Amino acid sequence: MRFADIPGHEDVKERLRDMALSGRIPHALLLEGPSGAGKFMLARAFAQFIHCQNRTAGGDSCGRCPACLQHSAFNHIDTFFSFPVVKKSGKPTMSDDYVEDFRAFMTENPYMDFDKWLLAMDNINAQPQIYVEEGNELLRRLTFMARRSQYKVVLLWLPERMMEGTANKLLKLVEEPFADTIFVMVSNNSRRILPTIYSRTQRINVRRYSDTEVQSILEARGVPPTDAADAARIAEGDTNMAIRLAEAGAERMQQLDLFASLMRKAYGRKVGELREWSKTVAELGREPAMKFLDYCSRLFRESFVMHLQVDNLLTLNAAERAFTSKFFPFINERNVIDLMELFDRSKRDIAGNGNAKIIFFDLAVRTIMLIRRQ
């Protein structure tokens, strides 16, 4: 991965170049920012630039030397990938157990869509973590000197998913690192990183992409301009979401159908049909069900904003606009906050492994009362 392969973020690229060229590279660097901002691509390009044997005059890795070719194949001997995984049959599990899956994932999803990583591990209901065994293995590997480069580079994706024991294992390395070791961490939610780790990193904030930048990224992937503009506007800078919206129109239509069905049945007080609806949504699985609840919250917000009659504030596609243009009168200042709190609470309950059928039926019954509040 070269800097030239990454859209935008020229300020971050320049800062990373200056670190490498000046030799003042922090031993623990954190790239923090929203999901879909291209942070891990920047981390990969930085590692390749550090190791490149023939940097270009323009401030990029050459892409042709042995080190660059090894980076392109994800097998540079002085580069280590660490990332959240799920346990296999309860056994100690480390990144190496999924390394081939992760290489394929990085190739197919350079913007690092976490939902697709769950699919790659064939467990959409999992809550991947970076386990203590991973910390032990990193400690063992990093005791060896760099073999072909001046620095060993650890690319650590989502440090907020480190277990506390793992973070404590790595804390000493971050506080008193080996002279030839660099940690480059990439976080979507830095507030969840253990404070003792976070405070010892040098941090670079990576902003979200603009809608125009996201649209250009989608068009480069072959998405028609109109569809790309629609997805970019709705995704609000999250390239992963925009790609999913462009790729999975059917999934979005399913979410709209489920939402519309809930609202109609709740308004009609059809409790028996709501029970069946609850079973249908529960069978989606935890992660898809949580995504559906996020989608519902978004449609509540859009419906409330529609009262303002300011079209450019809306992020709806044609089907959603057709539905909400009739539905929005039912969402008002007397029920919108309670509805969103209800759906957010249900999401937390689902994330906490609650019984999905009970949670969704309770949500449906409470919606009956709220949707009629005028």
Image (tube, grey):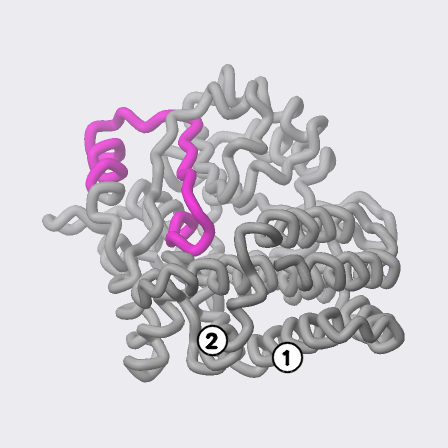
Rendered image: mark on residue 200: none
Q: Is residue 222 magenta?
A: no
Q: Residue tagged by mark 2?
A: 325
Q: Is 57 left or right of 286, judged from the image as shown?
A: left
Q: Residue farthest to the front?
A: 374
The amino acid beneath tag 2 is Ser
In this view of the protein, can residue 54 be seen by the observer?
Answer: no
Q: Is 282 left or right of 28, judged from the image as shown?
A: right
Q: Is 44 left or right of 248, judged from the image as shown?
A: left
Q: Residue tagged by mark 1?
A: 257
The span picked out in magenta is 14-40
Residue 332 % position (x, y): 54, 57
Residue nearest the observer in this picture, 299 or 328: 328
Callout 1: SS: helix
Callout 2: SS: helix
Residue 277 % position (x, y): 80, 74
User: Does 54 sit above or below residue 257?
Assistant: above
